[in-house]
Amino acid sequence: MASSGAVPFWRAAGMTYITYSNICANLVRNCLKEPHKAEALSREKVHFSLSKWVDGKPEKPTVRSDTSEH
Amino acid sequence: MAMAAALRREGRRLAQPINALQSHTSLISQDQAPHGARSISTQIVRNRMKSVKNIQKITKAMKMVAASKLRAVQTRAENSRGLWQPFTALLGDNPSADVKKSVIVTISSDKGLCGGINSTSVKISRVLHKLNSGPDRVTKYVILGEKAKAQLVRDSKKDIELSLTELQKNPLNYTQVSVLADDILKNVEYDALRVVFNKFHSVVSFLPTVSTVLSPEAIEKEAEAGGKLGELDSYEIEGGETKSEILQNLAEFQFSCVMYNAVLENACSEQGARMSAMDSSSRNAGEMLDRLTLTYNRTRQASITTELIEIISGASALTG
């Protein structure tokens, strides 16, 4: 297995398996040819807002969104 | 939602003229119209009929929208079931696992007007919370969607760890849900994650469902105890990874897959519930309209009759 050597490295970088597999998936998507590539990339949009709660009160929500980046 | 508030306000306003109308009709029947009044104004009834008709139009349109959204999300939800099934085949579902730190992930919708699906998942979450809390056991909530948040804030805001909203701005996709699952994993400590959602069964039936994702340590503990997880040792591990590394990767991936399926199933149930709720409310509006039309016509008829009698008796008084 080619990836087995890489495991300790992305773990040490503070990534979870989910982040790692997302990066890999994005790489694969970027390998597509043009009409399909734009379609696949536009399909996978991230948008949600997250707020942590401390002592029964919500903190200011942080918005995770990549619509502005593209 | 602004519309819900408008509907509710409309309902409250509507409640009054009904009584007013009844008192009017009772006045007619007893022939005790206020002094000097010739006939009763039907303006109020006409206005109400107009507003009920408008509400019916709105609910019909919402039903159509929900139906078309449902069709799109239903196929995705059904396809996504293939993602968690292998995990359940490999690791099994362990809802009864006895762990110290449980995290309940309650999935609900951001918008209302969709029947009881949100209260169902909140109720199930409360039961799970009660079952899993004890002297040395901690249970926390992670909430997806505005509606469950609004309900859980009331009695257990101390136990809320995270809340996530605005999920459905773009069509749901795996990348989004996996980033979300990642954020949850990074922000909570857990031995077991219990995902509560409404599983879509048909347009009118949703099964409240709990999926349990155990942390790698909890899996190993369960594996030692035997049962289905005891068979894990019979698998051969390729590459240089240790069993605990594999288990950790698996648990993380399992969580994101379970979340993806759960979010889709819940979105599907939401649209289905909204569809049936809107269907019954437009039917209700139709019934109300029928009743109103009947009262309106009866009142109109009565006033015409009164006028006729007045004219005829006036004429006969002149000739006689």
Image (cartoon, rainbow, N blue to C red):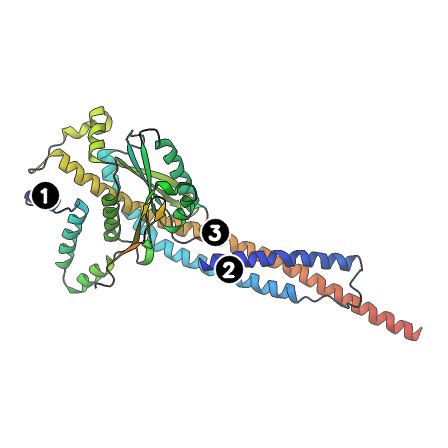
The relative height of residue B161 versus residue B71 in the rendered view (above or below) is above
Quadrant of the frame with the C terminus of chain B: bottom right
Specify the quadrant of the image occupied by residue B125: top left
Q: Mark 1 and 2 residues: CB-CB less than 8 Å, in contact?
A: no
Residue at the location (34% across, 32% down)?
B132
Q: CA distance from mark 2 to mark 3?
A: 17 Å
Camera-near label (2 vs 3) is: 2
Residue at 36 percent of width and 54 percent of height: B71
Residue type of the residue flagged with mark 2: Ala
Q: Which residue is mark 1?
A: A7
In the image shown, does B243 or B264 lie closer to the viewer?
B243
Disc 1 residue crowd, few under 14, some 14–19, many 20+, Cα 10 Å: some
Asked which secondary structure carries label 2, the reply is helix
Whether residue B172 is situated above or below residue B186 in the rendered picture: below
Tell which circle, 2 or 3, labels the residue nearer the N-terminal end: 2
Residue closest to the eye, A34 or B162:
B162
Query: Is residue A2 found left or right of B221 in the rendered image?
Result: left
Q: Residue A57: image x %, image y %?
A: 36, 47
Q: Nearer the viewer, residue B224 or B72?
A: B224
Taking the spot 58% from the left edge, 56% from the top edge, the residue there is B12
Tag 1: residue type? Val
Q: Secondary structure at mark 3?
A: helix
Asked if labels 1 and 2 share a chain, the reply is: no
Which chain letter goes with mark 1? A
Label 3: few (<14), some (14–19) or many (≥20) C-alpha neighbours in 10 Å: many
**Label 2, on which residue?**
B6
Quadrant in the rendering for residue A8:
top left
